[in-house]
Image: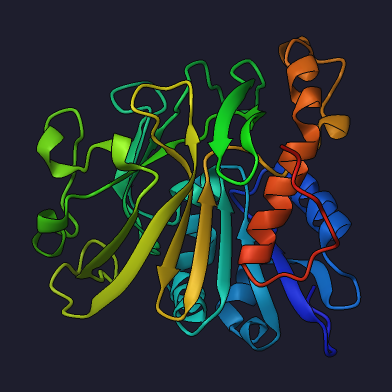
Amino acid sequence: MISSGQHKHILIYNGKGSDEESRNMLYHSIDSVADKEKHVVSYITAQEIKEGVWDKTCQLIVFGGGYDRGFNEAVGQDGMSKIRDFVLAGGHYLGLCAGAYWACDHIEFDKTGPLEVVGERFLKFFPGLCIGPAFPGFQYNSTIGARAVPVYYDKVGAFDTYMNGGGYFLPYLKQFKSNNVGQEFSTSLNPNLVMHSRQSLSSHSTPRMGSLHGPQHKNHSTVLHNSWKALGVYSSLENKPAAVVSCQMGKGTAILSGVHLEYPVKLLHKDDPHILQWLPVLSLSEEKRLFVFSDLLRQLGVIVRQCKAVL
């Protein structure tokens, strides 16, 4: 429910495709660090997104874990257009795990596997692919593939954070962009279509075609100038691909994360054997995780409580 007033709202998607645990973790973590004198944290439904009255008082809209095909079905093209227009006009978007996949130009999830989801996506905040799971073992509605993964973030260095099925980000080659929107891209079959991921800590400016009406309308002529940079990388994976990216889109910003930076270690299920083994290493990195999550919110225009970097 969206309330009125002078506060700038932080809206967390609550609807089809949204995982209850991730949604609750998001609410807890954002509410814990956002300045309550400046912001109100609340949920938003797919119907409210489509109605479009939320954008006037919204600072940030957030999509967390779950499954992005549910987002597609519930929010629909009308709702996605409103989210996209909100960011282009100066608003902000935070996507974690499924919310990050959903906001890329194209996704490859479990390609050739039993959970395969491959296709173009509408929002296109990141001009490239989100490929996952970045680490093996993921199963829906299970923590069997959950783990602590090492991430390098410039402001704090290396730390470990929770992950369960998230992806990594791989941008298109600059010469590849405009003429290929809507095609089925494959990193395995066409390695020359993507930039080598060891460039992941550099910034890129990428004017490209905007497929504003979905993959069935590939001849739209609007050129969108967006730039992106990697904020964090998977330090244990070959070539250290991007784990967290910041994308400038029009006047706004979208930050996408393959890892669950919103998960406080104290709220993880300590009686779950799949999680129990990771608690010691996650506990050691908790202060850094909290700083990184707060720093991302700060970059998205959220006024946060004071949080020192832990080096």
Determine whether 301 is above or below 245 in the image. below
Is 20 displayed left or right of 251 in the figure? Answer: right
Is 177 displayed left or right of 306 in the figure? Answer: left
* Point 85% across, 60% down: residue: 306
The picture quadrant where one finds residue 50 is: bottom right
Asked if residue 103 can be seen in this view, the reply is: yes
Q: Of residues 302 and 81, which is closer to you in this image?
A: 302
Estimate the x, y position of residue 284 in percent, counting from the top left. Answer: 79, 24
* Point 25% across, 64% down: residue: 206
Q: Of residues 75 and 107, which is closer to you in this image?
A: 107
Estimate the x, y position of residue 98 in percent, counting from the top left. Answer: 53, 45
Q: How many marks?
A: 0
Is 54 displayed left or right of 102 in the figure? Answer: right
Colour option used: rainbow
Is 73 displayed left or right of 302 in the figure? Answer: left
The picture quadrant where one finds residue 1 is: bottom right
Asked if residue 124 can be seen in this view, the reply is: no
Determine whether 283 is above or below 56 in the image. above
Estimate the x, y position of residue 89 in percent, counting from the top left. Answer: 48, 85
Q: Of residues 223 and 214, which is closer to you in this image?
A: 223
* Point 80% across, 16% down: residue: 280
Q: Of residues 277 and 12, which is closer to you in this image?
A: 277
Estimate the x, y position of residue 72 in percent, counting from the top left. Answer: 46, 57
Quadrant housing the C terminus: top right
Most distant residue in the front direction: 311
* Point 64% across, 87% down: residue: 53
Determine whether 96 is above or below 126 in the image. above
